[in-house]
Amino acid sequence: MIFDIYTMWLREMTRFVRARSRIVSGLAMPFFWLALVGVGLSSSFRLPGMDYMDFLAPGIVAMIILFTSIFSGISVIWDRQFGFLKEILVAPVSRTSIVLGKTVGSATVALISGFLMLLIAMSLGVLQPSAGVLTSVVFMLLTAISFVSMGLIIASRMRSMEGFQMIMSFLVMPIFFLSGALFPLENTPSWMQVASFFDPLTYGVDGIRSSFLGIGIFPIWLDFVVLTGFSACLILFATFLFRKSIM
C-alpha cells in the first residue's frame, strides 16, 4: 500500500516539476495581492499594535494553498477523460491508496507553493523569520490536505472540466473571504462571524497567523484540532465517493 501511495505521489510531483509555468502563474496572483492590494488597503486599515501587511501575509499564504489544493481535483477528470484513471482502477491497487496518493501528492504541491510565497513575504520584510515557520508549515499542510480532499470529493461526481471549474469558482471566493484572510473577523457582522466558524480556511489562516504574530481568534491548539478532524473526515468521505461513483 505504501508503494502504491508513493507511486501516485511521485506522479503528481513529476507533473508539477515539468509544468514550470504552473509554479510562476500560481505565485503571480498572490504576489500581486500582497504587493498591490496589501499596500492599498494598509492605508485604510488601522490595526492596533500591528502593521496591516503583517496581518495580510498569512492570509495570502493560505490563499495560494486554497487555490492550488482545491483545483487539483481537476486531475481526476483529466485522467478519466484520457483513460489513465480506468487503467489504475483495474490494476491490483486499492482505491484507498489511490485517494491517499493523490491527496498527499497534491497537498505537497500546494505546500511547496505556499512555502515559496512565505519566503517571498519574508524576503520583502513583511514577516520576520522565526520558530513560527515550523508551526505554520503544519497548518499549511493540514489546510492543503483539507482542500485537496474537498476537490477530490467534487471531482468524483463530475464528468466535465467546465462543470468542475464552475463549481469551484462558486465555492472558492466565499471560503476565502469568510476566512478572515483580508480583514479582522472581530469587526464583521455577527452573522459573518458565525459563518466563518464553519469555514475550515478560517482555522488555517488563524493558525498560520498565530504562528508568526502570536495573535488569533482561537487558541492555536483549537485550530490544529479542528483542521486535523476536518482533514480526516474529508479524506474518509473522498475515499468513500471514489469507490462508489468514480466509474
Image: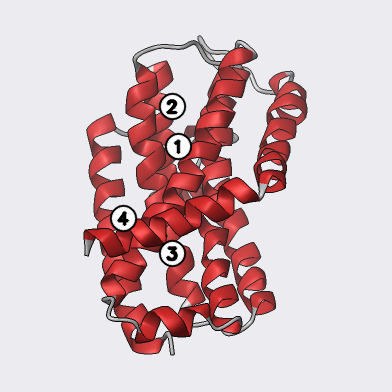
4 vs 1, front mark: 4
Q: Secondary structure at mark 4?
A: helix
Mark carried by residue 209 = 2
User: Label 4, label 3: how many angstroms apart (C-alpha)?
Assistant: 9 Å
Is mark 2 in CB contact (under 8 Å) with mark 3?
no
- The span from disc 2 to disc 1 (Cα, nearest Å) is 6 Å
Q: Residues within 10 Å of mark 3 (few under 14, many from 20)?
A: many
Question: Going from the N terminus, do you reach mark 1 or mark 3 first?
Answer: 3
The colour scheme is secondary structure
Of label 2 and label 3, which has the lower sequence position? Answer: 3
Closer to the camera in the image, 41 or 37: 37
Which residue type does callout 4 highlight? Ser
Amino acid type at circle 1 is Val
Task: Report if residue 198 is visible in the image.
Answer: no
Q: Nearer the viewer, mark 1 or mark 3?
A: 3
Residues at marks 4 and 1, CA–CA distance in whole angstroms = 15 Å
Element under disc 1: helix
- Number of the front mark, 2 or 3: 3
Q: Which comes before the other along the chain, label 2 or label 4? A: 2
Residue that label 3 marks: 150
Contact (Cβ within 8 Å) of mark 2 with mark 4: no
Are circles 2 and 1 on residues that touch, CB within 8 Å? yes
Residue picked out by circle 4:
231
Q: Split into 4 quadrants, where in the image is the C terminus?
A: bottom left
Where disc 3 sits, the SS reads: helix
Q: Which mark is residue 205?
A: 1
Residue drawn 68% across and 28% down? 34
The answer to whether 119 appears left or right of 243 in the picture is: right
Please tell me in which quadrant of the rendered image residue 148 appears.
Answer: bottom left
41 to 10, vertically: above or below: above
Compute the Cα span from label 2 to label 3: 23 Å
